[in-house]
Image: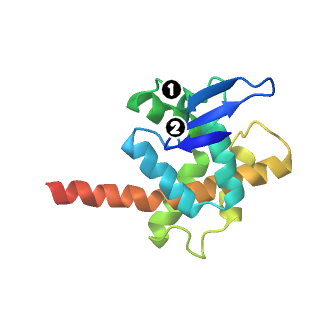
Amino acid sequence: LDDAVEERVNVIVHNGQMFRCALRRSPSSSLTNDCITAMAEGLHSTFYNHLLVLLWEDGNSGYLAKADSGVDSEWEAFNNIKMHICGKSSIFHKRYRMATSVTGIPGAPALTLQMFDCSSSNIEDKDTADKSFYSQLLLETLDSLHPLYENLKLDNLRKR
């Protein structure tokens, strides 16, 4: 890699050929960008790095990696990643919502991972370590996105 300027960089391959490449580091959707920023602040680095791999990877779910992705496809890709983390089940989210509505504070000490037993959440990987990883990732994801959600609600109320 050489001569990085803004979102462009020269890639020099082993045979001497040089390619100028454009790299996007953030989505053009402000809502998606706000969510990713909130997660960057709220997630443990291991979980955030895993999220980035899911968001930017090549393949069907890596919509953000496509140069022509628009605001709607970026939001859809972000939602697909969240659903992948959820394991296509809303049970964990429902339990989280009930627990946070009781305490009123996401991530309060009363909220523990045991409250969100994921044995019924249909996470595809049956391995206990994977379940624990995705359960903790989901808990931290919801904890980091909840304040953004509350802030958006307040913004909407102020606009009225």
Along the line of sight, which residue is nearer the eye, 13 or 137? 13
Indicate the position of residue 8 as horizontal and vertical percent values: 53, 37
Q: Residue at x 68, y 50 (%)?
A: 49
Q: Residue at x 67, y 41 (%)?
A: 53
Q: Can residue 86 be seen?
A: no
Q: Would you call the spot at circle 1 few (<14 residues within 10 Å), some (14-19), or many (20 or more)?
A: few
Residue 47 sits above or below residue 56 on the image: below
Residue 81 sits above or below residue 66 on the image: below
Indicate the position of residue 93 as horizontal and vertical percent values: 55, 50
Q: Which residue is mark 2?
A: 24
Residue positioned most to the left: 160
Indicate the position of residue 58 as horizontal and vertical percent values: 66, 27
Question: What amino acid does circle 1 point to?
Answer: Ala
Residue 28 sits above or below residue 101 on the image: above
Indicate the position of residue 3 as horizontal and vertical percent values: 59, 41
Q: Quadrant of the N terminus?
A: top right
Q: Left or right: where does residue 125 sit relative to residue 51?
A: right
Q: Residue at x 59, y 46 (%)?
A: 91
- Dot 2 falls on a residue whose secondary structure is loop
Q: Residue at x 71, y 23 (%)?
A: 17
Q: Mark 1 touching mark 2, by CB under 8 A?
A: yes
Q: Tally the numbered discs.
A: 2
Q: Colour scheme of this structure image?
A: rainbow
Q: Would you call the spot at circle 2 few (<14 residues within 10 Å), some (14-19), or many (20 or more)?
A: some
Q: Left or right: where does residue 51 sit relative to residue 16?
A: left
Along the line of sight, which residue is nearer the eye, 65 or 115? 65
Q: Can residue 48 be seen?
A: yes
Q: Which mark is residue 67?
A: 1
Q: Left or right: where does residue 40 sit relative to residue 156?
A: right
State the separation of the CA atoms marked 1 and 2: 8 Å
